[in-house]
Amino acid sequence: MTKVTMNNDNRSIWVFGDYRNYFQNRVTLQLLARARELAPRIGAAVCAVIFGNHVDEYIREYIAHGAQTVYVCDHPRLKTYAVETFTTLTARLVMRYEPEIFLIGATDFGREFAPRAAKRLKTGLTADCVGLDINETGLLVQTAPSFGGNLIARIITPEARPQMATVRPGTFPERPHDDQATGQVIAIPFPEDIPCDRVRLVHSERKPPREQRIEDARIVICGGRGMGSRTKFKKLFEMARLMGAEVGATRPVVYSRWAEHDSLVGQAGKHVHPQVLFSFGVSGAIQHTAAIHDADLIIAVNKNPHAAIMKMADVAIVADASQFCSALIRELRKRIRE
Ligand SMILES: Cc1cc2nc3c(=O)[nH]c(=O)nc-3n(C[C@H](O)[C@H](O)[C@H](O)COP(=O)(O)OP(=O)(O)OC[C@H]3O[C@@H](n4cnc5c(N)ncnc54)[C@H](O)[C@@H]3O)c2cc1C
């Protein structure tokens, strides 16, 4: 690969290479594309940072998608993500190379790793950005929804460096793959003095993908704590099977492990826009409803007629959620037999 010359003061925008689930997860490529648009406005080069073991394939891919320089640390200890090791290594590299801007995808990985890195570097972090720009003074303007999506905040980091942001996947389009692109690769030796993580990954297994993504479902059935128990919550899966729907959940449900984390609907989870959304035993907290506003029709079942969800619902049914669910399943089964 040919070497690219960095500008005089070596200003750079860094993008963290999150290549897990690579072909589904395109956020690194999207960030490289946006970084290339912003970089000329502050006279910076665009760099990707990769930690892993045998990651040459990703180096080539990042250069083809806009990285002018790739910092790569390739070592068996980096084969799987280990938060403490990744944080320490990142902090050391950032302190050494002093990028102006550091962008990370707002994936589950990025949401864990970025705040730790920002804390270690004593800089700010804007989480879950939906826009990035450069203002007239050359600062990164980080646009992020706040207060449950009711406000859009534009945030700058005037003094601390780097200016750090996590960005939601899908916010920016990626650049076309350019086979002819060239870039500089800087190999970083793994610092052996980094202590091993206190948490050791023993085994990991890829979860089978959902049949359809909840974000794309025409019918979504959301369950909240008012379903009462894990056993009662399971009725929602049966109802979903009968209707061809996807099940969503509120945060207490996910925390109680009645449903998987990828079912979480809300500010910290998925945004849905179905034709019909059923809501069972959900209070309607803003952090949840911020993500269901786009549903065409909301049918809510709650024992409390004054619950916030009942006010936003098109059809509000005052009933016990679990009992109503059982009755609806019986009715659906009858109709399916007909
Ligand atoms: C920074 C932050 C981010 C957050 N992000 C999210 C997010 O992404 N998604 C999310 O969901 N939450 C999120 N939350 C949590 C959110 O604020 C609420 O606490 C949560 O949505 C409440 O969940 P719930 O409605 O299931 O439970 P509860 O608030 O406990 O409500 C249960 C509802 O069930 C009803 N009920 C009880 N028993 C029955 C019954 N037998 N039959 C019918 N109805 C019944 C009650 O009347 C009540 O309305 C976030 C909070 C914070 C601070």
Image (cartoon, helix red, strand yellow):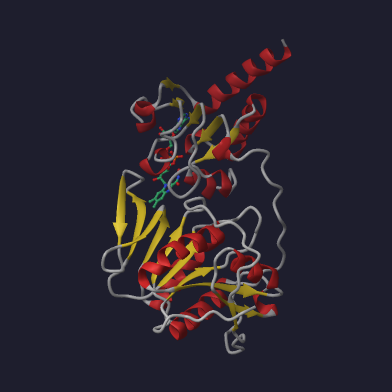
Q: In the image shown, does 187 or 236 lie closer to the viewer?
A: 187
Residue 214 versus residue 154 in the image, above or below: above
Residue 63: where, in percent of width, then height? 60, 69
Report the quarter where the C terminus lies. top right
Residue projecting furthest to the top: 338
Q: Decide which of 314, 43 is in the foreground and name it.
A: 43
Q: Which quadrant does the N terminus fall into?
A: bottom right
- Indicate whether 307 appears above or below 50: above
Task: Count up the numbered dots.
Answer: 0
Q: Where is residue 65 in the image (x, y as percent from the top left)?
A: 58, 63
Q: Position of residue 132 (x, y in %)?
A: 39, 58
Q: Where is residue 204 in the image (x, y as percent from the top left)?
A: 71, 62
Location of residue 108 (image quadrant): bottom right
Name the residue at 63% across, 52% down.
24
Q: Residue at x 53, y 22 (%)?
A: 324
- Give residue 82's quadrant in the image: bottom right
Up/down of 327 relative to 103, above or below: above
- Residue at x 48% of width, y 41% of height: 271
Ligand 1 placement by image quarter = top left
- Residue extending farthest bottom: 193
Determine whether, in the image, residue 303 is placed left or right of residue 188. Answer: left
The reply, left or right, for residue 75 in relation to residue 157 is right
